[in-house]
Image (cartoon, rainbow, N blue to C red):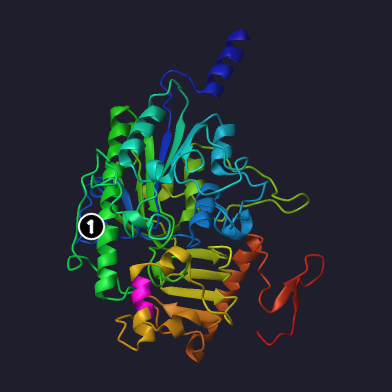
Amino acid sequence: MAFTQFLFILLNIGIIVGAKKRNVLLIIADDAGFETDVYNNSAIHTPHLHALAQRSLIFHNAFTSVSSCSPSRSTILTGLPQHQNGMYGLHQDVHHFNSFDGVRSLPLLLSQANIRTGIIGKKHVGPEEVYPFDFAYTEENNSVLQVGRNITKIKLLVRKFFQAKDDRAFFLYVAFHDPHRCGHSQPQYGAFCEKFGNGESGMGWIPDWKPQHYTPEQVKVPYFIPDTPAARADLAAQYTTVSRLDQGIGLILEELRDAGFENDTLVMYSSDNGIPFPNGRTNLYWSGTAEPMLLSSPEHTQRWGQVSQSYVSLLDITPTILDWYSIPYPAYSIFRNKQQVQLTGKSLLPALVSEQPWATVYASQGHHEVTMYYPMRAVHEGPYRLIHNLNFKMPFPIDQDFYVSPTFQDLLNRTQSHHPTSWFKTLQSYYYRDRWELYNTSADPSETQNLAADPAHRDLLQRLRDQLLKWQWATFDPWVCAPDGVLEVKLSPQCRPLFNGLD
C-alpha cells in the first residue's frame, strides 16, 4: 500500500525515470511581416529565421485575430478574441485597456500546472493578476528598448532564465520590440529605431548586433505601400531593424541549444499584427492581418521545412501550447452567472503530422489608441474575406506613430498638392468604407473589388454573414447586434431593432 502511494506521488510530480519534460519557447515580433526569404522576400537577409524555418512547419495562411498590439498580445496569451477577454485597445498610458479580472490566461494556467513561466520584452497587457509570470523583464520594470531591442541584453536574460536551478518544465515568452516604429516615441534613433545600438555617437552599442544596411533601391515594396522614395527609405530603415530581430532570434536559439533544451522544446515564431504602413496595422484586410508563423517541434521532424496552406490564427497559440503540455482548458465563466468560456481556436499539433483541412479564420477589432474607435468584425474562408465595418459612417482613424511616419506624411503631402501618390487607393477611399466588404482574395489579392453589392454573390454574402454572426455569439461579443440593434440578453430575440436606417 505504501509503495502504491509513493508511486502515485511520483507520477503526479512527473519524476518517473525516463519521463521527458516538454518546454515551450514562444517568440513574437512587434509589427513584423514577411520581410524574410522564408516568405520569398529575397531583398533582405535573415539567416536565423531561415535556419529556424528549416526545422519548422511554415504556415502560409496565418492570421492575427486583431490588428493592434495589446489586443493581439491578449489573444495570444488567452486564446480569446479581444472583445471576449476585454483588451479592447492599447494597455499603456491614457489608453489603459485591460483584460477582465476573471480571464484565465495561458501563463496563469501554466503556473497552476506547476510549469515555470517567463517573459522577456514587451508585455503590453494587464492586469498583472491575469497575466502573472514567474520571471519577468518587461517595460513594467525595465526600459523597453533594453529588454525589447538590445539583443545582447535579451540573450543574457534568456541565459539567466535557462540557468535557474529549477527542474520544472518551462514556458518562455520572448516578445521583441523590433521592428516596431519609434519615430513618435524615440525619434533620435530613426523611424524604426534602426540606429539604436549601432555604435554611432549617442546611439549606444549592442555588442552582438552587426547592422545590415539597405538602400531604398534594394527593398521590395508590397502592393499596399506607395512606391515612392519616402516609402522606400522607410522600408530600408525597417529592414535594418529586422536584421536586429533576426540576429536576436539566432542568439536565443543558440542559448536554447547551449542549455541543452533544443530537443525537448516546442518553438513558435510569429508577430502580433500587420506592418505599420498604409492598409497594414489596424486594418482587417490581408495586409493588416496576415502573419508569419513557424512551428518547430523536435518530436515531429517529418514536416520540417515544409509549407502548410492550412488557415491558422494567433487564437490557436494558447490551445497549441496547452495541448503540448497535455493541460485541459478549464470550465469557467468570466462573469458570474454567465455561460462558460469555450476556446474557438484549435491546437496546431496535428498539422505537424499531416496537412489539415482548416480553411476559416475570424477577426475582431475595436480600438487601437483610445481615440481610434472603429469596430470591425471579419471572417476569411477559403478565398473569400468578409469585413463588417460597424462604424462605417465615420472616417477610418490614424494612429500617432504611423501619422508621423515618412510614408504617411508623404502620402498626405502628395494628396494635398494633387501629385501622384503611387498608391493603389486614395485617402478618401481609405478613410470612408462600405459597411460590408467582400473580396475574392484569389482573383483579387489586392482586395480592391468589393463584391458585397453584387447580386451574383448574394448567397455567399449571406452565408458568410451568418457564419460571422455565429462566431460572435459563441464568443459573447457585446457588439453582436451593432450598429442597427441593441443587445438585450433577457429578451427574445436578444437583438432589438433601433430602426436607425442602417440595416
Indicate the position of residue 221 as horizontal and vertical percent values: 26, 70
Front in this rendered view, residue 320 or 159: 159
Image location of residue 81, percent across then percent down: 57, 58
Magenta highlight on residue 411: yes
Task: Determine the residue positioned at 20% across, 67% down.
Answer: 216
Query: What is the magenta range?
Result: 407-412
- For image coordinates 34% across by 82% down, the residue present is 414
Residue, disc 1: 37
Identity of the amino acid at label 1? Answer: Asp
- Image quadrant containing the C terminus: bottom right
Q: Tell me if mark 1 has few (under 14), some (14-19) or many (20+) residues whose alpha carbon lies within 10 angstroms of its own.
A: some
Which secondary structure dominates the residues rendered in magenta? helix
Q: Is residue 72 left or right of residue 500?
A: left
Residue 173 in picture, x, y percent from top left: 44, 41
Q: Residue at x 26, y 58 (%)?
A: 239
Q: 62 above or below 52?
A: below
Of residues 210 and 2, the one nearer the viewer is 210
Residue 257 location, quadrant: top left
Q: Is residue 222 left or right of residue 342?
A: left
Q: Mark yes or no: residue 402 visible.
A: yes
Judging depth in this view, the residue of 27 and 63 nearest the camera is: 27
Q: Secondary structure at mark 1?
A: helix
Residue 445 visible, this angle = no
The magenta stretch spans residue 212: no
